[in-house]
Amino acid sequence: MKLKDYNHLAEQTPGVTPQFLAAVISVHGMNTFGPWQKHINTVLEDNCIRHTPVDYGYQIRRAFRPFTGGLLREVGEKIVAAYQDQRRWNLKACAIGHSFGTLSIGTALQQNPELILPRVITFGSILQCGFPWRRLFDRGQVENLLNELCAGDLWVRCARFMISGSGPSGCHGFTAEPFIEQREYEWTGHSLLATQLHCQEIWIPFILRQ
Amino acid sequence: MLNNSHMSLNAFDNLRSTHPDWLGVIAAIERQINRTLRVDPRAVIDDDVISQQSQVDPKLVMRLLVELEAWHALVRRLFWLCPEGRGTTSEANSLEEFPAFIECHRCGQKHSLRSGDVDVRFLPSESLLREISTTQDR
């Protein structure tokens, strides 16, 4: 039987371990349902990576202050639930976040010390440039971070005026740390990076790197 | 004379108690696996072959073989198939044992690991082989 069929059955059969190389949780941004999560799903599956897309619906108003905190808590709970689901099989857990999804992942890591995501990928990040990744690294929650940025990302520039606790790390990057890899692109804007080709060539090697 | 319960294999008895509606199907698969392993105890159990030989729905066979793994009667074995259709290029017990790339000894090309090229089949566990060797042929 094909590996995909086996994994489908193994996940439903107590005592049998499905075969994956890693597990990814993806979190989309606001003002979208995150179609990119569906696009990359095929590529991740082809590469033997279990993917759980976290979907919190189409949100605009609740992302803005003073409601930001409530939505972050709600998305954080979904991230933790997805993590617990992945943990059943001791898979190396990774996260890919876009825009509001980056703020959600960062906040979930801060608020849940047991949430361990060795590899984190952010693009169109609205986390603050001085986000305390070093503290999360020292606590063993994060081992490597790939931050993909574009100086011309307008959404990222505007986010801090509307969304509590946000910042322009998707334009200017995070404070440099040896475990943070930052890649800058000129014309990718806020959300053009989430293609199957980019996932195959950049994200998957980062996720599977030893 | 031995009755049926003595001649049946433990893991299949577990399947029968879990799926009382599938007794005929389970018996057909049990017969087929029993027969195969009596001829060659090192035979690889392939769901396609079992399904064809026992005339059982392929999806049902897949499900029951995975359940037999859970009952420790079968052991999973992964086969990395050459995408050029030249047969198995590597095999392992778990996905992590495979390299990310392989120089295929079948076709001479370099292949990267893709889930679509990995087939899962099964080997009998030691306990299943012991049981088969001590039970009467059905």
Image (spheres, rainbow, N blue to C red):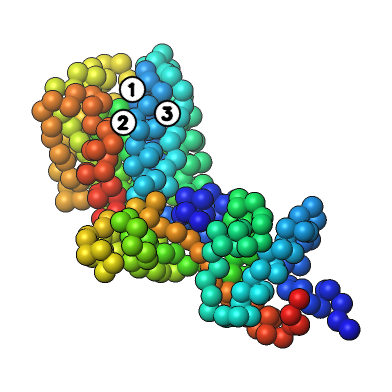
B34 horizontally vs A17: left or right? right
Residue A191 image offset from top left, x and y in percent:
26, 26
Vertical comparison of B34 with B99: above or below: below
Q: Distance of mark 3 from mark 2, alpha carbons?
A: 14 Å
Q: Nearer the viewer, mark 1 or mark 2?
A: 2
Residue depicted at x 80% and y 56%: B20
Q: Chain of mark 2?
A: A
**Of helix, strand and loop, which one carries label 2?**
strand
Q: Which mark is residue A98?
A: 2
- Label 1 vs label 2: CA separation? 17 Å
Q: Secondary structure beneath disc 1?
A: loop
Question: Which of these two is toward me, A34 or B107?
Answer: B107
Disc 1 or 3, which lies upstream in sequence?
3
Discs 1 and 2 carry the same chain letter: yes
Q: Are marks 1 and 3 in contact (CB under 8 Å)?
A: no
Q: Residue furthest right?
A: B1
Name the residue that disc number 3 marks. Answer: A72
Note whether residue A183 is visible: yes
Quadrant position of residue A106: top left
